[in-house]
Structure formats: C-alpha cells, structure tokens
C-alpha cells in the first residue's frame, strides 16, 4: 500500500504547544508524569502516531525508552539501544536533528519488535542536550509521509530544549541522592566565637557594595542558622507517626510558601515573588518527598531524615561549578529550615526585629526578607557574598543600603552595637569613636542637604548652560525598579531588560502574561516613552527552563537576538505582547546585539507576521511602533549607515561595545585595566555612529555605565549624544552636572581629545575642563 503524502496540514505545532508544555511543567512536578504528558501533547499537536523520549542511562552509552505515546506501553523502560545504534542512536551520536522520509531504507534503521511499532514512513529525531552532552533523544514518527517545514522543526527543537531542562533539573536531585551523604553534625554556618570589643575603640569591617547609602543605627542580629545542630537520631521511632508528622509539616510549609509569595507580590512585584513558586515546586517534587520517606522508613526520625536529605543537597550544590546551580543551595536551605520549624515547633524569634536599626546576618534567605518588617531595616550587613541572591535583589528594590561579603560580621558585632554603615564605600564602623560619629553626623548633614538640593531637580529637565536639552532615562529589569526610576526623576525607560521577568519564572510566560506586564510598565510611566528590548539571554544570562549548549566563548556565541531568531514562535509571542501593550502608551521596540543586515530584516519580518496574526485574531495593537537596533558589536557600528535605513532609532550599548572593541572582558580581573571607555577607539566609534545617526535623522540613545562617569558624560555630550539610559540612582547627580556645562565648549573639547593617542591624556583633559566648569 502506497503511503499518503502530506506536504502541508493543519499542524498545530507552534507557540501554543510551547505554552502548554510550560503549563504541564507547572502542574506536575514528577519527571515521568511530566514526560508522559509531554509526549501525548506533542503527538497530538504534530498529528503523529508516535512521540517518544529516550534518555541516556548512567553508563553514558545506553539510550532507554522513558516515555512514549503510540508505542507499546510495556516497552517503556525495557527497550534500550546504544549510542550510534539505529536512527535514534545515530541522532545521539551525531548530536544533530535527523529528519527522514522512508526511514526503513536508511542504513542505520533498526526495528524493535518489542515496541510493536507499525511501519512508519516519516522519522524525526532531535537530540536533548545538557550543555554539550547528549542526554537523550526526542523522536517523532508518522505512519504517512509528512514533510516537516523548517518552522515546525524549529518548534520541535525548542520543545527538545524544554524537555532537556526538565530532565537536567530532575536528574540533579537524583545525582545528589546517589552520592554518599556524609553525617552532618552541623549544617550551614561555621561555629564562631564572639570576642569582647573595647568600647573606647572602633573597628572597620569591609565588604562589597550591594546598594549604596550611608546610615547609622544599632545592630539587629539575625543569627538564623538551619537549626539542625541539636537534631540527633532517635531510637525505636514510630515510622508511621513520623511519616504523618512529615506530611503535616510539608502541608504547613506549602501554605506558608503561598503566603510568602503573595506578601512579596503585594509588597514588590510578581517577578520578585516568583522564587517562592520555585520553592513550592520543590516541596511538591515527588523525588524530594520520596527521599525523606526513605530515610524515615530506614528507622530515622522525621527531623533527622530532613537533616540528612537537606544536608546532602547543600553539600552537593556547594561543589557545583555552575553559578545558577550553586545559588539553588539557598533555596534548599530556606525550604529545609522552614520544614524543620514545622516539624519540631520552632518559633522564628530570630526574625522578630526588636527596634529600627541595621540588620546583621550571616546569610539572608528569601523567606527571611519576606517575613521581616522592612520599615525597621535602615541598612543590611551580610557575611555571605551573593550579589545575585533574591534577598539582595529585594533589598535593592526596597532601596535599603547594603554591604555583602563582610567576613566575621557576626563574630565581631554584638547585639545593639552602634554602627555606621557606609554602603557607598563598602565600610562598616563598629562602636565608632566620638570623632568618627562627629564626622558621620557632618556627612549626614551634608548628605541631607545634597538630597534636598537634588530632590528639587526631580521635575527639572536636564539642560546645558547653552540650552541644549539632554534626556535621562532609566534602565529597569523588574516592576520594583519602576518606583526607583520615578523617584529619581527618570524621563521614561531607555532600556527595559525583558529577560529578568523570564529569569524569575519557571516556564515561558505566555502572550497575555507578557502583555499585562508591559502594560503595567507603560501605564506607570504615564505617557513617558518606554524602550522594550526583546529577550537577551546567553552569555551571563540563562533561563532555568531553557538550557543553551555549553560554549567556549558564550559572549560571542549563541545568544541574544540569535537565540530569538532560532526560536521564532517564542520571539513572535513576545513581539505580539509588546505590540498589544503599545496601545496604552509610547513603546519603542529594540532588538539586541545586531551584527548584520540580515538580522534586522528578519526581525522586521517577524514584526510584520506578529501584526498579521493579531489582526486575524481581532486583538488591538499599535501599527506604527518605532523599531530600533542595539549597537553593541563593532560590526554594527561599521554597517550603521545601512541599518539606519531600516530602523527608527539606535541604542548604543557601551558595556559590550567597549569589551568587544578592546578584547577585554569587563568581568575578568586579569584584563580589567584594559577595559577603558575613554580609549580612542571607543570614542572614534561613538563619533562615527553619532554622525551616521545625524545624517539619517535616526534617533540615538546611549545605554551603559559609561554615561555615569562625569568625564565620559562630558565627552559623550561633546560627541553629539543627547539621550542616555542609566541606572536610576545616578540620574539626579548627572542632571546637576549637565546643568553646569556648556555643550558648545564640550563639542570643541571632543574634537581636541579625538586627536589624543591614549585614554590617560584624554581623561586628564576632560577632568581639567570639568574643574573649569565648576569654578565658573
């Protein structure tokens, strides 16, 4: 019998499938259940008779059937093949997608009788990756001939990424469980001993600035360790009673977690609260619960079982090289501590602040920050050095001065000790002398006067002495940044980093979720323009549910707009949400890391398709949304005359442009001295781009830390840049600086410094001019 041939169908593979898979991940926290649900969904949407997932065994050479829709259920778990064996094994071996019609004619084809599979005429296999390693294969089989389009194969590849991320996260817990769990007499903080301090002297402790500011007050000590130090195993436990005790503690902890999520969402934003959904997923993870049950059934008490399991996780996470996975140790520690409190009836007295003051802690977990009374926290001193921890992120959102990485803080600071926290310099003065206190009060008086002076500039436009208008906009990433931006007088948003809401979630947000988020941002800025950058992941930014392949140089690899263009469904969904939100106010759409002409053309094609889709659905959208290219690659500078004909504006991203131009990774201490925004090559590139923008009447905004340096800002104004997007707290001081300079003189100075051969001479000349402006 001749098979039917399908060139096109009503195939519903697409964005809705990706969204539904994300929903399945949220609804089910068991790996096998999730994989079974996914193969059923994909088989239905692809109109295929079979969808299967093969995963690599621990021996790293055997692929085993783990889930299937269409094959004999009895074959799940029993059918296996070696890497390189059969078409599925060949996909794993070659680490590439294989799509074939009449697969039985291929030399690598192998028939497995135990699956009772029929004769299939179409085969698609997509490898599942954990970084560069193959961990499995997603297989689609059709009884009829079917030619999968590039778009459909792209969607299947994205689905494979989602499946791989689920598997990696689940196996992470399994791997830890299979390691030898060491007996932990203490977990978390090291034992420290206080030493007496001479109250006539003072001690200076130092750390890393997390959020600037200078405050004084008494120490509020939060010595909130896990509490497992006093938990020992019990003899002759009642296993049934301990299991019931554990299940009740899990129930209470889940309820508390839902409360914490709501509290943070109400206080800050849904994005800030998303970490507690991750906690809820762990608390509902069957593997996690089974490990706890197994320890109890071995004859241990519930608290001791929890001590063993959480301790094993913390030890294993701490050894991991991946920064994202290491940070998950804080989540396990948080969950473990709250579970223990519910198991043994611990009262969280350590979290009750007795008075307003400066909080001191070894480590502050997300639930700590959610429970504490923020009105009583004047500043924060944290021993651990976790700049990207959720607690530090929440402190920044609340505007609390904070210093992290302060070694020995708990051992040296007594409860109620007098402190001066200078988070501008990363210094803490403990029991300051009278002379230090006098100096602090003088500085505090000056600071309050400066604040009063700068507050008066909030609604005053930034204008040079010769009446040249300069726009100062804010960079934001989370909803909680909006209040900080408005408080500092930002004239809209020059860069909304949309990857941050993506990173805070456990699955891809759908169109409606994104629309509501962008709508809130534009409404909160009340008519001020908002520039929304499309998803910019890769390099140092990853999504927990979308694992990119490991690369030797990820900053120059598969990242940013390249990822978006290879995942068109996800990209188009975001663009549709932005177009919908633009109905409510002036939104500009920005594409990151453009490096060639074809990329901007492809982006514009997807914008057109997004508009057509919204029109078909009858959803209102903004037809004439301005489109922009982020210029952060040297190649984009050189082809900017061509790009200017395709876009409405440029956003000049100096952070990346400087490091790419100078081959100096700004995060590498060994080459830090080479990273210099005043390097002649940087200034000449900016001058060229500014001239191109002027010639083509293309709007240009500079976005980056460069603009927060007064010397650099003077040079940039001289080069013709009149719009800047920066971290909001810098805006008041830079506005004051701009109001003191003359743009005509800055232009003459720029022409002069462009002839200088080195940045040292350039900076000296700029500072000399700044002194002249100050004197006048």
Image (cartoon, rainbow, N blue to C red):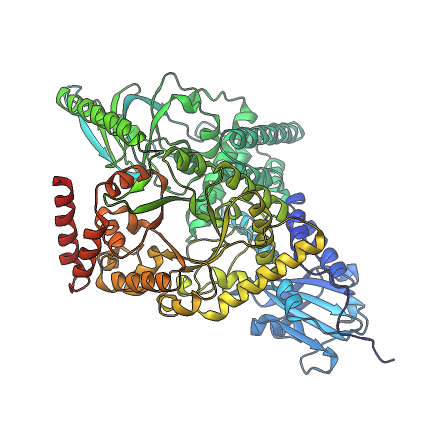
Q: Is residue 698 above or below residue 250?
A: below
Q: From the viewer's perspective, is 704 left or right of 262?
A: left
Residue nearest the observer in this picture, 648 or 682: 648
* Point 62% across, 66% down: residue: 154
Q: Position of residue 176 (x, y in %)?
A: 52, 49
Is residue 199 among what the camera can see?
yes
175 left or right of 159 in image: left
Residue 730, image quadrant: top left
Kindly identify the residue that appears in the image at 18 percent across and 19 percent down: 199
Q: How many marks?
A: 0
Give left or right: position of 593 versus 236: left
Q: Quadrant of residue 294?
A: top right
- For the point 29% across and 36% down, the residue is 406
Give the quadrant of residue 752: bottom left
Left or right: 679 as drawn, with respect to 211: left
x and y percentages locating residue 278 in the rendered image: 55, 41
Work out which residue is located at the far front of the displayed protein and give it: 467
Report x, y in % for residue 260.
Answer: 54, 30
Query: As drawn, which residue projects farthest toward the top?
Result: 354
The quadrant of the rendering that contains the N terminus is bottom right
Q: Nearer the viewer, residue 493 or 420?
A: 493
Find the residue positioned furthest to the right. 1
Q: In terms of depth relative to the viewer, which is nearer, 246 or 135?
A: 135
Q: Which quadrant is the C terminus positioned in? A: top left
> Can I make out residue 506 in this image?
no
């Amino acid at each position: 019998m001749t098979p039917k041939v399908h060139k096109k169908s009503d195939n519903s593979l697409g964005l809705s499938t990706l969204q539904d898979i994300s929903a399945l991940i949220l609804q089910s926290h068991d790996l096998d259940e999730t994989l079974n649900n996914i193969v059923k969904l994909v088989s239905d949407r692809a109109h295929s008779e079979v969808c299967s997932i093969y995963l690599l065994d621990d021996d790293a050479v055997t692929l085993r059937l783990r889930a299937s829709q269409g094959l004999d259920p009895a074959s799940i778990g029993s059918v296996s093949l070696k890497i390189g064996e059969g078409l599925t094994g060949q996909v794993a071996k070659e680490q590439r997608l294989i799509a074939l019609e009449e697969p039985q004619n291929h030399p690598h084809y192998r028939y497995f009788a135990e699956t009772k599979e029929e004769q299939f005429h179409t085969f698609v296999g997509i490898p599942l990756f954990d970084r560069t390693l193959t961990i499995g294969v997603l297989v689609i089989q059709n009884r009829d001939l079917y030619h999968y389009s590039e778009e459909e194969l792209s969607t299947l590849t994205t689905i494979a990424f989602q499946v791989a991320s689920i598997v990696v996260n689940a196996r992470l817990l399994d791997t830890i469980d299979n390691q030898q769990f060491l007996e932990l007499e203490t977990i978390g903080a090291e034992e420290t001993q206080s030493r007496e301090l001479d109250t006539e002297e003072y001690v200076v402790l130092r750390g890393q600035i997390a959020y600037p500011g200078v405050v004084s007050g008494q120490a509020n000590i939060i010595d909130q360790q896990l509490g497992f130090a006093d938990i020992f195993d019990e003899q002759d436990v009642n296993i049934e009673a301990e299991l019931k005790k554990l299940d009740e503690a899990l129930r209470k902890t889940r309820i508390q977690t839902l409360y914490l999520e709501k509290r943070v969402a109400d206080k800050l934003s849904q994005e800030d609260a998303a970490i507690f959904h991750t906690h809820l997923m762990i608390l509902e993870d069957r593997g996690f619960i089974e490990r706890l049950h197994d320890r109890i059934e071995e004859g241990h008490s519930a608290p001791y079982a929890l001590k063993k399991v959480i301790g094993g996780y913390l030890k294993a996470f701490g050894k991991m090289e991946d920064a994202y996975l290491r940070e998950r140790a804080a989540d396990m520690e948080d969950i473990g501590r709250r579970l223990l409190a519910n198991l043994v009836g611990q009262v969280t007295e350590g979290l009750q602040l007795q008075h307003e003051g400066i909080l001191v802690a070894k480590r502050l977990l997300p639930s700590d920050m959610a429970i504490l009374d923020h009105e009583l926290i004047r500043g924060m001193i944290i021993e651990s050095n976790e700049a990207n921890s959720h607690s530090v992120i929440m402190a920044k959102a609340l505007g609390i001065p904070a210093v992290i990485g302060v070694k020995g803080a708990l051992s040296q600071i007594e409860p109620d000790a007098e402190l001066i926290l200078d988070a501008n310099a990363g210094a803490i003065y403990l029991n300051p002398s009278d002379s230090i206190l006098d100096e602090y009060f003088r500085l505090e008086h000056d600071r309050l006067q400066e604040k009063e002076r700068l507050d008066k500039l909030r609604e005053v436009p930034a204008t040079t002495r010769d009446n040249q208008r300069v726009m100062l906009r804010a960079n934001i990433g989370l909803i909680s940044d909006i209040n900080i931006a408005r408080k500092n007088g930002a004239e809209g948003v020059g860069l909304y980093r949309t990857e941050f809401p993506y990173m805070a979630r456990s699955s891809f947000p759908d169109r409606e979720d994104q629309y509501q988020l962008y709508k809130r941002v534009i409404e909160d800025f009340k008519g001020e323009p908002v520039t929304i950058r499309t998803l910019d992941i890769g390099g140092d930014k990853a999504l927990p549910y979308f694992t990119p392949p490991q690369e030797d140089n990820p900053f120059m690899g598969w990242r940013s707009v390249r990822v978006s263009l290879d995942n068109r469904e996800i990209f188009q969904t975001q663009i549709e949400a932005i177009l919908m939100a633009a109905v409510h106010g002036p939104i500009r759409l920005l594409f990151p890391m453009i490096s060639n002409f074809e990329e901007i053309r492809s982006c514009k094609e997807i914008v057109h398709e997004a508009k057509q889709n919204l029109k078909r659905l009858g959803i209102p959208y903004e037809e004439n949304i301005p489109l922009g290219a982020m210029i952060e690659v040297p190649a984009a500078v050189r082809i900017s005359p061509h790009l200017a004909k395709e876009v409405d504006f440029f956003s000049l991203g100096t952070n990346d442009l400087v490091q790419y131009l100078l081959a100096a990774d700004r995060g590498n201490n060994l080459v830090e001295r080479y990273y210099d925004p005043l390097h002649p090559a940087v200034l000449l590139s900016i001058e060229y781009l500014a001239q191109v923008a002027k010639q083509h009447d293309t709007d240009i905004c500079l976005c980056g830390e460069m603009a927060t340096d007064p010397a650099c800002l003077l040079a940039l104004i001289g080069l013709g840049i009149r719009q800047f997007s920066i971290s909001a707290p810098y805006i008041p001081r830079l506005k004051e600086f701009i109001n003191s300079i003359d743009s005509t003189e800055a232009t003459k100075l720029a022409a002069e410094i462009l002839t200088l051969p080195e940045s040292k001479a350039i900076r000296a000349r700029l500072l000399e001019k700044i002194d002249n402006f100050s004197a006048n």
